[in-house]
């Protein structure tokens, strides 16, 4: 297989094509995405830009940058467009991969760069967050850009003053995207790298006043605006409660120290066996690490340990480490590419792809997941299985190389994403509340009522972002009260229809809509 300069462009174009159906057809998830939409709408109504509330309750969990993007979309289009909102994740993802790729140019063989590019683009969590409405990919991009400027400052031929300002700018934007982890990752990575090189005394050469001026100025203006809009209580919530309390004794997402040691295996699937085994083998053999490799290793290790020490843990928090983990493995790949054990690892990875079709057939015949019995999902699983079989054949060909196997799986995975994405309209009712809210609003308009209730639905309070109407959340204990309600449109799980045998129900996926007159 021949690889040239067009490989990078083709990777990006194919990835964009693969996720297009998801960008245009996927529904908003109830937990985070719908909540962000509701928060943004509330901010627009309240004319606030630095302090946020969710149904009147202060929401200081996140900085404002991402909410500004959501607010901009609502202001521009009058509604929330998935494709537009996804750009705040998709574009940073592509910039991150492009930055890593250009960063290692000249220090990594082109073949290995292509392999790393393909693995990062299709690494489970990275690929997923590229089309998810979250601020994590923005954080990842700014951290990668910041550390690239730090690395430039270690090279005497570079303009250190310019890089110092850019390091500070990207660090502040990382903080402005997701909080203090945006500062801790580049700072801790720099410290560990300099300690490793025996150059810790030069720390302030890189993190001197030129680096700190923009973060300090930006933080002063930001916190001043927060105080002006929300007062002392909101400022305290943002600076102390959401930062130190989450770090020491989290009130959300608390998990044990070893959480990420487990999460990393499925977070970079399907490449976890390949990537982790290469890095592990390099460590066992004590292979030498040169300048850039040391920085990547220092970033991956320090981020992993630092996040493990923080009380609040989620898989997505580890995202900034993934580019460095994957590209570090790609550095070592050139010394292990022809070893037998790596072929075994690749064959296991390909074997997992082969299991796609049987797995979907089994899952689609289970009651709770029977909605997956869709011809496009079967087609997507078939493509994935065929890609696995072709990759297995290439593993055992004498002339075959790692890039051939990875390339086969990469293209097969992208084709799977494209075909599976086309099935989203059929399975959206199990993903989000878009279709349910549309049917509810139609009935409410037909019956000339604004009384909407949701019975035992997950996170229904943010449906107002889709309907423009408040939703009354009810539990099973409220059934008696609900039966006596009048002129109320009720959204409920289908299993609760047995309590309303005389009501006509509109079925929407796992849910239903009834009208109580």
Image (cartoon, rainbow, N blue to C red):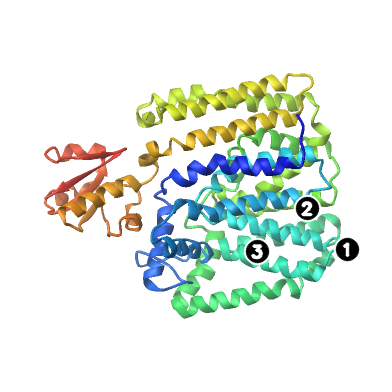
Secondary structure state at the residue bearing disc 2: helix
Q: Position of residue 275 (x, y in %)?
A: 70, 37
Q: Position of residue 448 (x, y in %)?
A: 16, 56
Q: Is residue 394 above or below residue 196?
A: above
Quarter-of-image position of residue 213: bottom right
Q: Secondary structure at mark 3?
A: helix
Where is residue 466? Give x, y as percent. 34, 55
Residue shown at 78%/53% (left/top)? Answer: 295
Which residue is the site of mark 3?
183
Taking 288 as reference, is 170 above or below it?
A: below
Classify the position of the N terminus by image quarter.
top right
Which residue is drawn at the image coordinates 43% and 73% (left, top)?
A: 48
- Which residue position is annotated with label 2? 295
- Local SS, label 1: loop
Measured along the vertical axis of the image, is residue 149 above or below residue 9?
A: below
Q: Residue furthest front?
A: 6
Q: CA distance from mark 3 to mark 1?
A: 25 Å
Residue identifier under label 1: 156
Looking at this view, name the residue that lies furthest to the right: 156
Q: Earlier in the sequence, mark 3 or mark 1?
A: 1
* Mark 3 closeness class: few <14, some 14–19, many ≥20 residues within 10 Å: many
Verify CB contact (< 8 Å) between mark 2 and mark 1.
Answer: no
Residue at the (82%, 54%) spot, across then down? 196
């Amino acid at each position: 297989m021949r690889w040239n300069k067009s490989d990078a462009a083709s990777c990006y174009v194919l990835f964009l094509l693969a996720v297009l159906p998801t960008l245009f057809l996927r529904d908003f998830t109830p937990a985070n995405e719908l909540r962000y939409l509701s928060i943004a709408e509330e901010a627009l109504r309240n004319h606030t830009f630095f302090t946020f509330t969710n149904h009147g309750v202060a929401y200081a969990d996140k900085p404002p940058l991402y909410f500004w993007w959501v607010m901009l979309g609502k202001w521009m289009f009058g509604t929330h467009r998935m494709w537009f909102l996804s750009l705040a994740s998709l574009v940073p993802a592509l910039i991150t991969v492009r930055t890593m790729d250009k960063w290692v140019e000249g220090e990594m063989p082109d073949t290995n760069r292509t392999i790393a590019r393909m693995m990062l683009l299709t690494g489970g969590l990275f690929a997923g967050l590229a089309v998810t409405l979250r601020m994590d990919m923005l954080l990842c991009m700014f951290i990668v850009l910041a550390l690239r400027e730090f690395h430039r400052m270690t090279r005497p031929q570079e303009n250190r003053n310019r890089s110092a300002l850019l390091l500070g700018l990207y660090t502040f934007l990382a903080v402005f995207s997701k909080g203090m982890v945006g500062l801790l990752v580049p700072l801790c990575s720099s410290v560990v790298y300099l300690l490793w090189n025996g150059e810790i005394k030069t720390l302030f050469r890189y993190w001197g006043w030129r680096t700190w001026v923009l973060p300090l100025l930006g933080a002063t203006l930001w916190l001043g605006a927060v105080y002006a809009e929300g007062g002392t209580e909101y400022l305290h919530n943002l600076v102390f409660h959401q930062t130190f309390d989450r770090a020491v004794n989290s009130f959300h997402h608390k998990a044990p120290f070893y959480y990420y040691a487990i999460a990393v295996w499925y977070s970079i699937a399907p490449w976890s066996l390949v990537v982790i085994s290469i890095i592990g083998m390099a460590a066992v053999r004590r292979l030498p690490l040169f300048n850039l490799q040391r920085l990547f290793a220092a970033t991956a290790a320090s981020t992993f340990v630092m996040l493990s020490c923080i009380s609040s843990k989620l898989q997505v928090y580890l995202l900034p480490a993934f580019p460095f983990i994957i590209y570090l493995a790609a550095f070592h790949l050139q010394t292990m590419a022809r070893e037998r054990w790596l072929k075994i690892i690749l064959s296991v990875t390909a074997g997992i792809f082969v299991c796609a079709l049987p797995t979907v057939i089994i899952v689609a015949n289970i009651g709770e997941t029977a909605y997956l019995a869709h011809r496009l999902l079967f087609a997507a699983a078939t493509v994935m299985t065929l890609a696995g079989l072709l990759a297995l054949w290439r593993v055992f060909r004498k002339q075959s190389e790692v890039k051939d196997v990875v390339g086969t799986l990469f293209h097969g995975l992208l084709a799977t994403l494209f075909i599976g994405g086309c099935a989203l309209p059929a399975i959206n009712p199990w993903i989000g509340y878009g279709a349910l809210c549309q049917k509810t609003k139609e009935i409410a308009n037909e019956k000339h009522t604004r009384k909407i209730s949701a019975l035992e639905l997950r996170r229904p309070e943010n449906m107002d972002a889709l309907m423009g109407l408040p939703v009354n959340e009810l539990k099973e204990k409220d059934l008696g009260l609900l039966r006596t309600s009048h002129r109320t449109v009720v959204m409920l799980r289908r299993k609760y229809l047995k309590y309303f045998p005389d009501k006509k129900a509109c079925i929407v996926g796992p849910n239903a809509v009834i009208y109580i007159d």
